[in-house]
Image: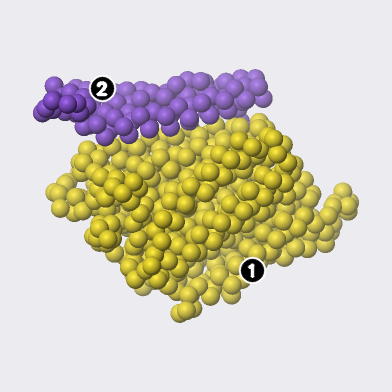
Amino acid sequence: MTLYLLCLVLFCIGLYGVLRKRNLVKIIIGLGIIEYAMNLFFVLLGYRSHGRAPIVAQDQNILNMVDPLPQALVLTSIVIGLGVTALVISIAIRIYEKYGTFDITKINRLKG
Amino acid sequence: MHNIQIIPLFVIIPLFGAFFVSLIGRYVKKAVVKAISAVSCFLLLILSFYGLYMLRNSGSTVLVYKIGGWAPPFGISMVLDGLTNFMLITVNLIAFFVCVYSLSYMEKYTDKPKFFTLFFLMVAGMNGLIVSGDLFNLFVFLEIASIASYALVAFGTEAEELEASFKYAIMGSVASSFIFLGIAFLYGFTSTLNMADMALVLSTKQNIWVVPFVAVLFLMGFGLKAALVPFHAWLPDAHPSAPASISAMLSGVLIKTLGVYALMRVFFNIFGMTRAYSQILMFLGALSMIVAVILALSQWDLKRLLAYHSISQIGYVVLGIGLATPLGILGGLFHLFNHSIFKSLLFLNSGAIDYAAGTRDLKEMSGLKQKLPITASTNLIASMSIAGIPPFNGFFSKLIIIFACIQQGYIGYALAAVIGSILTLASFMKVQKFAFLGELKEKYKNIKEVPFAMRFSMVCLAIICVLGGILLLPAFTFFLKDAVNVLLAGTGYAHTVLEAALR
């Protein structure tokens, strides 16, 4: 249970970063933290105490294994997160070239 | 005789197109890239019509393709049913016309192979999301389409475009995280990811808080992708900043596929629609309808005005679907189809004005009707469709939605729909007056009508706008009725899919 609560705390830190920070880079870091919290939560769902990796080998009898499916899905999710982060960072770099600042209160050419 | 091997082609063709175009784009002539793009989109369009024909003749309501031969719930399955067909035809129809339009329109941008790569990735994501029968797969395709659209919004790499794209990317990613969290909860509860199997488990297992909690997460996530009103802040920035052809794609089909379709599939077919969900959806729909159209009235940037109208029209769709009665869903889905046609056309028109006259500001343009007759007349048709003037297609779908509201006793929502429609008419009168009527300005004396490819797309979409009403004739209603039946079946979807998978 503690682990889930820590996971929630991590998620809240990420959300705080996205919502409250004024620096583009800090917002991106917040987004990264949210993604980590999600992935951690998904992996935790498949975890069993004293479980072992579900690798089938000859003359081995696995009695207590962790659920492998969340791990496979989290791998996919990490790759997606990588793609988003790379794209967002490259946009942030271009924004810095155009506006000369990372401060979102000064990046306000769009109105309405 | 049915040929279910064609179902994965909806994903394979655009993905292969994206890969191929980006690989060879640098070494071959531009004409080759254009030819590959147009042919792929045309193939997709043909395939989606063939899918409709195949499903009608197969004698069953659903066809399931099992990837790698693994039967559900173990493998990933692709499902072709009435709703899938409806959405596939909508998406691929718009994608084809937008692709043809882009052949000429993208001349003013530099890197065309990259544009078509991103365009195809977006189409692949949308098609994949529609045919997917697996919840996590749906999420992956949703992300493919989203990431491609973030990049396409920033395609011009001007200051405003980058700003809009950044905003869109951050909000979209947070929304995706909520969707992912919802999927995690559902997996933890049901131990399955196949949508049909999940519906079956949820209907047998007692639960008090999991489904409502996940429903809220999905409502936030998909609601943000669909730009319903409390979650709409990114859309008026993102849609106008993209190139016009991409705005047409984003407003025309992306928000509907990623938002409304996914919402429908999850709420109707997995959770089963209850009165509470229905009330929430209707309230959000009515709110979007009114708030967005009032915001649209004061806009002077043509594309931003159109973007606000997208939010408003999505409100109509969600209101109709939220009613969860046969008539309401029919109206909602029909409006979804119609809106994708006329909103794409309106954005293509704005692109044509931008291409010829180089402005998006309504105060700048005047009397363009003399110089751009085809743009002006197609725009008039689309404006009348979106405002709901008979006999154009928008009239029929709005009428059905209003009737459905009255039938269920929601007079307030019906009134809101009528007021929204009148305000829409007012703001499009403004567009007509300032853009096309009046005196031609001196600096526009030498502009010419846009090239053939752009005119072709606009004229075809305008013809569909005029003829759209025939989908309600008895001979053609099967197209909408099949989609409505899938939603009305609710969690019965689970049994039909699992039975079809056994065959």
Q: Amino acid at mark 2?
A: Leu
Q: Is residue B426 left or right of residue B235?
A: right
**Is label 2 in a helix, a strand or a loop?**
helix
**Is label 1 in a helix, a strand or a loop?**
helix
Which residue lies at the image location 48% right of the left edge and 47% below the top edge? B12
The chain coloured purple is: A
- Residue wearing tag 2: A6
Which residue lies at the image location 44% right of the left edge and 56% below the top edge? B6
Q: Amino acid at mark 1?
A: Ile
Report in which chain the residue with disc 2 lies.
A
Report in which chain the residue with disc 1 lies.
B
Q: Colour of chain B?
A: yellow
Q: Residues within 10 Å of mark 2 (few under 14, many from 20)?
A: few
Which residue lies at the image location 52% right of the left edge and 53% below the top edge? B253
Q: Which label is found at residue B463? A: 1
Q: Nearer the viewer, residue B206 or A64?
A: A64
Which image quarter holds the N terminus of chain B? bottom left
Which residue lies at the image location 72% right of the left edge and 56% below the top edge? B453
